[in-house]
Amino acid sequence: MSRLSLIRDKKFRDHITPEEHPESPARLVALDNMMHSMSLNETFNELAPRAASVEDIASVHSLDYIAELEEGSKEAIELGRLIPLDADTFMSPKTFETAKLSAGAGLVAVEAVASGERDSSFVAVRPPGHHALADKSMGFCLFNNIAIAARHAQKTLNAKRVMIIDWDVHHGNGTQAMFYDDPSVMFCSFHQYPFWPPDSGWYTEDGSGEGRGYNLNIPLPNGTGDRGYFEAFDRLVKPVCHEYQPDVILLSAGYDAHELDPLAQQRVTTLGFAMMSQRLADLRDQTGAKLICFLEGGYNTQSLSESALATMQILNAEGAEASAIVQTSYAIPAASGDSPVTQDRSPDAVDERIIDIRRHFGKYWKTLR
Ligand SMILES: [Zn+2]
């Protein structure tokens, strides 16, 4: 039986962006096509999304902001064109509807793990969410899907501790802001730094009030490869997760740290994402937490599709089966005969950064001392 529920729907293609915009419906078309060509259509427990209600969305967004987006889509219908919200975020006639469905897919995913039959879900949606602030859209994001799901998990799963891991190449500034003073939701983000959003995501942004120490930023130098990501996972995320003992782990699954991505400069490979996914599956199994992944960025449609599918296949598999999937599907030897995982452009800078972060967070987490 499958362990993973997949929430996908052709309606997520209805949010339209300008021509040449990287966050396009083609991203999900490519994922559907690859699933078909790899004969994966019957593999997962597929569920349909439902639209999130205003009340659900208002758990993290202001009512004024929700109304503003509704108006934006009306305006797009009346004027028959896209309405810009900022330099790179747009509303099309069906954007409001699609954004509610995108948020609602996360609610379905939470409920799917609540039944106990399956412990993992993957939400293949757009628009993405992790840059969206309580009262402002940003960076292609309208509603913060993962934040809305975190609040839903606290309510429906009675989750006392929710851990959000964000491996999108950009800092998840919206998610950070929403839980900055809240120890019941730990936020942990890997991102290229310095990068976009500007001046966002340094490790001294570690939370406020009771949330101090529950916001773990891992700003990685430009050119970090698989090796640096594994080190950061194993020396920071993994030990802190074991100490925090979350009931639920949510992943902002962006794949724009891939070496083929056009927007960023990190060097993670598809095999690298597969091996990160294996680490995530191990955390789930060792802590007994439920796990839900939310598609965020990833703008090379080929690398996005294969990396997202690697995550889904690995989370769906049982122990030994998962490593067989990694071996057969993704462990493509490098042409040079070297290890197929990529090294960092400046490994010393990555290692020093990890040491600095461990030192800073040692005052909050025993395991890092
Ligand atoms: Zn991103």
Image (spheres, grey):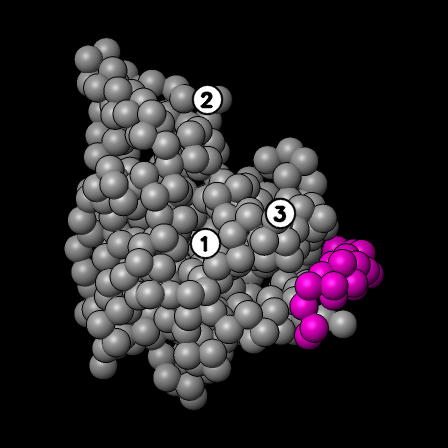
Residue at x 62%, y 73% (from the top left corner): 239
Q: Please give the residue where the numbered disc 3 appears in the rendered image.
A: 208
Specify whether residue 48 is painted magenta.
Answer: no
Q: Please give the residue where the numbered disc 1 appears in the rendered image.
A: 252
Lower sequence index among marks 1 and 2: 2
Dot 2 amino acid type:
Asp
Q: Which residues are magenta?
A: 342-367
Relative vertical location of residue 287 with respect to residue 44 in this rendering, above or below: below
Please identify the quadrant where the N terminus is shown: bottom left
**213 left or right of 325 in image:** right
Specify whether residue 285 is in view. yes
- Asked where in the image residue 293 lies, by quadrant, the reply is bottom left
Which is nearer the eye, 314 or 161?
161
Dot 1 amino acid type:
Ser
Dot 3 amino acid type:
Ser
The residues bearing labels 1 and 3 have C-alpha atoms spaced at a distance of 22 Å
Q: Please give the residue where the numbered disc 2 appears in the rendered image.
A: 86
**55 left or right of 262 in image:** left
Q: Are marks 2 and 3 in contact (CB under 8 Å)?
A: no
Q: In the image as oriented, which residue stretches furthest toward the bottom?
A: 320
Residue 283 horizontal/vertical position (percent)? 50, 75
Lower sequence index among marks 1 and 3: 3
